[in-house]
Amino acid sequence: MTETVLTSTKHEISTAIPAIRLRGLTKSFGDTTAVGGVDLDIRQGEFFSMLGPSGSGKTTVLRLIAGFELPTAGIIELEGKDVTNTAPFERDVNTVFQDYALFPHMSLLDNVAYGLRVRGIGRKERRARAEQALERVQLSQLARRSPSQLSGGQRQRVALARALVVEPKVLLLDEPLGALDLKLRKQMQIELKDLQRSLGITFIFVTHDQEEALTMSDRIGVFNNGRLEQIGSAHEIYERPSGQFVADFVGTSNLFNSAMAERLYGRTDVFSIRPERLRLLWDAPEKQYDGGATSAGGTTFVAGTVTSLIYLGHATQVRVALDSGFTVVVLVHGDLPGSEDELHQRRVNVGWADRDAVWLPDTPSRKF
Ligand code: ADP
Ligand code: MG
């Protein structure tokens, strides 16, 4: 928790110990810096996602937390206890790997019970707890099957049951839904989230899929090049990206350059606006906007020409080449005022509420 209280001695203290605390966490492999100094507190019972492109260091951070790798520098605490150099089995965490890593020759029940056997738990209790874990992921009926007799989604659930059976404080999940088709993935997202909520275990969930991170997480950490660019709720990350990288990586962003910013608002920072925050005026009074831009009463309009329309089912994505020289994407819900042929090359105005402009002052201006 981030809440702080004032004690009688007027010192500020945190009211809760984080499930995981990383400080200056760094990992190099030869010349490659996979993780370049990560500071992060993950709260107890939180669903925390690490989001970032391939190669940004997410798996390495997870492996460091699990103890499969030792850091080059920095510290790792689990519930206030320094585990930076302790062995994996001495850490109260468990991992669900991307490829599930099930034992093909064992039944589901034995696969799930395995972690208990390693911990020296007796046969009877092993069995009871494994059965309970399989029940939790709705696979009790298939307990005698082997992994090869299961679908991808079922295998994923077995991997989950196997990780949960030892009742870890923290569950680490490395792209656990990556191998599933879209529909099953969506279903498993809901199941995973429900399970996490009912168990109250801290989940650290690695994904490169921004939509997955946005829908599942209490908070998200966005990785780029071994560093955390931003930490925040889905809403904060999406609505108030901290810089160009996050604005670009999470959802679609229209980036407006500093020349445009200066003309419209008299400041030279880059700003971004989401496609769904732009609106189209199909019957543009050409003279009024004069090919340039006007800003009045908190709303801004710029003139341009429609270059493409892509029907997405729930909306249409319209590209508009602005007269000022770059192209924006506008998401239009509802019916369009004509056929694609009629609207192609149509002169329009693109408008937005000025408060929807997200300023990215840390971003060097690009040439568009
Ligand atoms: P992600 O999970 O975000 O895709 P990784 O943590 O797997 O990223 O990798 C981060 C960087 O570290 C990549 O450049 C990767 O090639 C490198 N890396 C990861 N593991 C090793 C390793 N065992 N040896 C050398 N380089 C590694
Ligand atoms: Mg990875």
Image (spheres, rainbow, N blue to C red):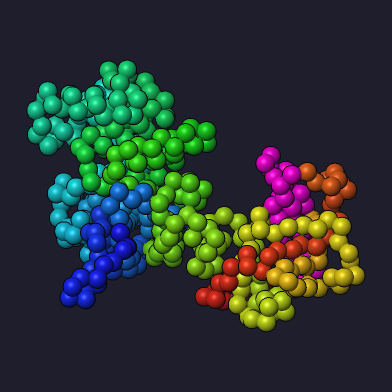
In percent of the image, x 29 and y 43: which residue is there?
200
Location of residue 227 in the rendering, given as x and y in whole percent from the top left corner: 39, 65
Q: In this view, does 43 lie above or below 24?
A: above
Q: In this view, does 254 lie to the left or right of 88?
A: right
- Please identify the quarter of the rendering in which residue 1 is found: bottom left
Q: Is residue 206 left or right of residue 86?
A: right
Q: Is residue 251 left or right of residue 61?
A: right
Location of residue 262 in the rendering, given as x and y in whole percent from the top left corner: 68, 80
State the predominant SS element of the stretch in magenta.
strand
In percent of the image, x 40 and y 55: which residue is there?
219
Q: In this view, does 343 lie above or below 165?
A: below
In percent of the image, x 19 and y 31: which residue is there?
114
Location of residue 173 in the rendering, given as x and y in whole percent from the top left corner: 34, 45
Residue 320 counted in the magenta span: yes
Residue 214 counted in the magenta span: no
Rendered-image quadrant of the C terminus: bottom right
> In the rendered structure, which segment of residues is drawn in magenta?
308-334
Q: Quick one: 340 or 30, which is closer to the camera? A: 340
In percent of the image, x 69 and y 52: which residue is there?
331
